[in-house]
């Protein structure tokens, strides 16, 4: 068996070499006759694969950008890739030339093994993708629709505050629940208690299985598609077993809440939600083929998967920075007290009158961009940028982390300093607003950005208004200062830390009393 395994690896390398040489010749004899962008020197067959770390790739990519420039060229076996590390280059290419830079790299593993149907996040830029984006935009980018979610956001913020009062130590779980329950209710209409924690836990497990399943062999199949024909009982084909198991879990995550919506539609008690909207838009006279049903299930699941972890991470980054910088928290609180007073809780209409809190939120996005490498795009047509050729089919990785650490834009970029935005002119603030890059670019920009931004703002404004946050103390009374650290991966999750959160009692408002009627499920 070992011999066979070696043969598979040997064949993979051989095929790679052949494809690679073909690719290489094509690149250098492309019609532009321009050089490729600079990058670290790779090996003949592997390209730069062996230089890519498995963890915190954004840091390595940033160090390459410092050496080679804002566009770095890499090769993963035969596949070209560019890493974009400046906002200007990302906007020039991914936004101004959106017609060429808006597809996604094709993943054999995800699209042929794990998912029953491609979902929006992974779709190439086809008519189907445009249709799905239109549906997301109609639901999450229209002002009227966003305004209609305000009562829901208010309800979940009240639950969050009540949870924080009841169990301050569980703040990470409460923030996760806030972000998750909100997106679940938008997706499926019923209260999160019905789909409940069990659904969130199972969805997390399925996603972990996707990540685990994406080990070496599954990554290889993306570069050497012939591997998909290796039977699963032969070494090298074992990834298929894991992939099929993952597919079963994903199917269940997609189907369970969808079936509840279908059932309540039959019973005439379904709430208006993204799933009912999609059913209305995509079914013909109430009829639905199997593929369309999977498309709808996929779109609703994407809403939860793309929306909850990213939103939660922003909120936890906020708590962490407030623990570390109490003077900033107190300054935001003083602003809030002077504008809102203590008789009511802040709402989204107050946003424009709280400029310092706005600077704090911008700095939270910048300090820990929730998706440090975004989601890769791919180039559909050969292109040129400055003096370089960008080959068709290249994977495009925006290094959002590098953009947030650009010293030309932000001095002392590792320091958490909301005041950097306070000191800027309106034009400069607009140009340097991290929301210009943390939500991605161009035709694939995050369609949930307005919802995410308002949900995060509402939660942090209400936390600042009602809670006191500071460092926890050990039994000897000494302050415990959390050391900021983040998980590696698509989302930069904050590693757990402890802090001391207490409800504030002000002259006239006792928030615990105010929220006594709010139940958390
Ligand atoms: C702070 C919270 C969030 C952050 C930082 C974030 C960030 C991102 C980023 C970087 C991308 C990739 C864009 C690109 O390819 O250029 C993306 C895509 C996406 N996001 Fe978000 N997101 C957040 C919240 C949400 C929410 C709440 C939703 C749900 C409505 C959502 C739905 C999506 C979808 C569906 C895509 C794929 C779009 C496509 O492929 O065309 N996101 N997001």
Image (cartoon, rainbow, N blue to C red):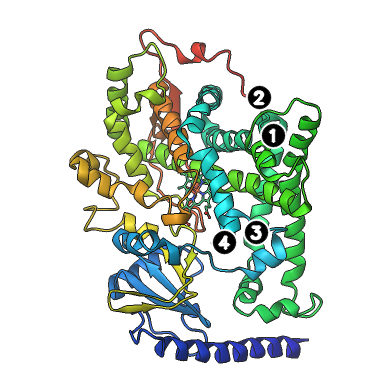
- Residue behind mark 1: 196
511 lies above or below 233: above
240 lies above or below 354: below
Please say whether residue 43 is visible from this viewpoint.
no
Which corner quadrant of the image does residue 269 belong to?
top right
Please say whether residue 137 is visible from this viewpoint.
yes
Q: Earlier in the sequence, mark 1 or mark 2?
A: 1
Query: Outermost residue, front direction?
Result: 285
Mark 1 vs mark 2, CA separation in Å: 9 Å
- Give yes or no for contact between labels 1 and 2 (Cβ–Cβ under 8 Å): yes
Mark 3 vs mark 1, CA separation in Å: 26 Å
Q: Specify few, some or many for label 2: CA neighbours under 10 Å numbering under 14, 14-19, or 20 or more.
A: few
Q: Earlier in the sequence, mark 3 or mark 1?
A: 3
- Residue behind mark 4: 126
Q: Specify few, some or many for label 1: CA neighbours under 10 Å numbering under 14, 14-19, or 20 or more.
A: some
Query: Outermost residue, top direction?
Result: 508
**Residue depth check, mark 4 versus mark 1: number of the one nearer the observer:** 4
Relative to residue 9, is residue 146 drawn left or right?
left
Q: Quadrant of the C terminus?
A: top right
Q: Residue at x 35, y 9 (%)?
A: 507
Mark 3 vs mark 2, CA separation in Å: 34 Å
In what element is the residue under mark 2? loop
The location of residue 63, given as percent across then percent down, is 33, 69
Q: Quadrant of the N terminus?
A: bottom right
Q: On residue 118, which mark appears?
A: 3
Mark 4 vs mark 1, CA separation in Å: 35 Å
Q: Earlier in the sequence, mark 4 or mark 1?
A: 4
Q: On residue 521, which mark appears?
A: 2
């Amino acid at each position: 068996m070992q011999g066979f395994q070696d043969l598979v690896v040997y064949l993979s390398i051989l095929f790679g070499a052949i494809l690679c040489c073909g690719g290489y010749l094509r690149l250098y004899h492309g019609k532009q006759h321009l050089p490729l962008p600079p990058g670290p020197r790779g090996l003949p067959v592997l390209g730069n694969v062996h230089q890519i770390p498995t963890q915190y790739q954004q840091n390595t990519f940033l160090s390459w950008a410092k050496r080679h420039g804002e566009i770095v060229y890499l090769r993963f076996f035969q596949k070209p890739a560019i890493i974009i590390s400046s906002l200007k280059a990302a906007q020039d290419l991914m936004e101004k030339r959106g017609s060429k830079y808006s597809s996604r790299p094709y993943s054999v593993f995800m699209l042929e093994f794990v998912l029953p149907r491609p979902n929006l996040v992974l779709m190439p830029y086809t008519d189907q993708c445009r249709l799905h984006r239109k549906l997301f935009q109609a639901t999450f980018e229209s002002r009227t629709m966003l305004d209609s979610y305000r009562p829901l956001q208010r309800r979940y913020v009240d639950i969050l505050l009540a949870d924080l009062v009841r169990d301050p130590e569980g703040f990470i779980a409460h923030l996760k629940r806030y972000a998750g329950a909100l997106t679940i209710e938008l997706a499926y209409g019923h209260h999160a208690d019905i789909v409940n924690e069990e659904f969130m836990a199972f969805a997390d497990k399925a996603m972990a299985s996707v990540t685990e399943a994406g080990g070496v062999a599954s990554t290889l199949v993306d570069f050497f598609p012939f591997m998909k024909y290796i039977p699963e009982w032969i070494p090298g084909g074992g990834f298929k077993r894991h992939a099929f198991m993952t597919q079963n879990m994903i199917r269940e995550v997609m189907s369970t809440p969808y079936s509840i919506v279908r059932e309540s539609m039959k019973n005439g008690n379904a709430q208006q939600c993204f799933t009912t909207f999609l059913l209305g838009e995509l079914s013909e006279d109430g009829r639905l083929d199997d593929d369309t049903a999977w498309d709808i299930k996929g779109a609703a699941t994407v809403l939860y998967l793309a929306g909850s972890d990213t939103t939660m991470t922003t909120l936890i980054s906020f708590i962490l920075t407030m623990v570390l910088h109490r003077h900033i928290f107190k300054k935001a609180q003083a602003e809030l007290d002077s504008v809102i007073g203590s008789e009511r809780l802040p709402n989204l209409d107050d946003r424009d009158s709280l400029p310092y809190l706005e600077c704090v939120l911008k700095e939270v996005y910048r300090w820990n961009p929730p998706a440090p490498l975004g989601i890769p795009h791919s180039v559909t047509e050969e292109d040129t940028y400055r003096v370089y050729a960008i080959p068709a089919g290249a994977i495009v990785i925006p290094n959002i982390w590098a953009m947030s650490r650009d010293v030309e834009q932000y001095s002392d970029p590792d320091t958490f300093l909301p005041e950097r935005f306070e000191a800027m002119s309106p034009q400069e603030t607009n140009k340097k607003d991290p929301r210009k890059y943390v939500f991605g670019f161009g035709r694939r920009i995050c369609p949930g950005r307005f919802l995410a931004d308002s949900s995060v703002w509402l939660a942090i404004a209400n936390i600042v208004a009602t809670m006191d946050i500071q460092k926890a103390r050990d039994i000897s009374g000494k302050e415990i200062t959390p050391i900021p650290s983040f998980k590696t991966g698509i989302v930069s999750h904050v590693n757990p830390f402890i802090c001391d959160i207490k409800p504030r009692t002000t002259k006239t408002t006792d928030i615990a009393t105010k929220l006594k009627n709010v139940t958390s499920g």
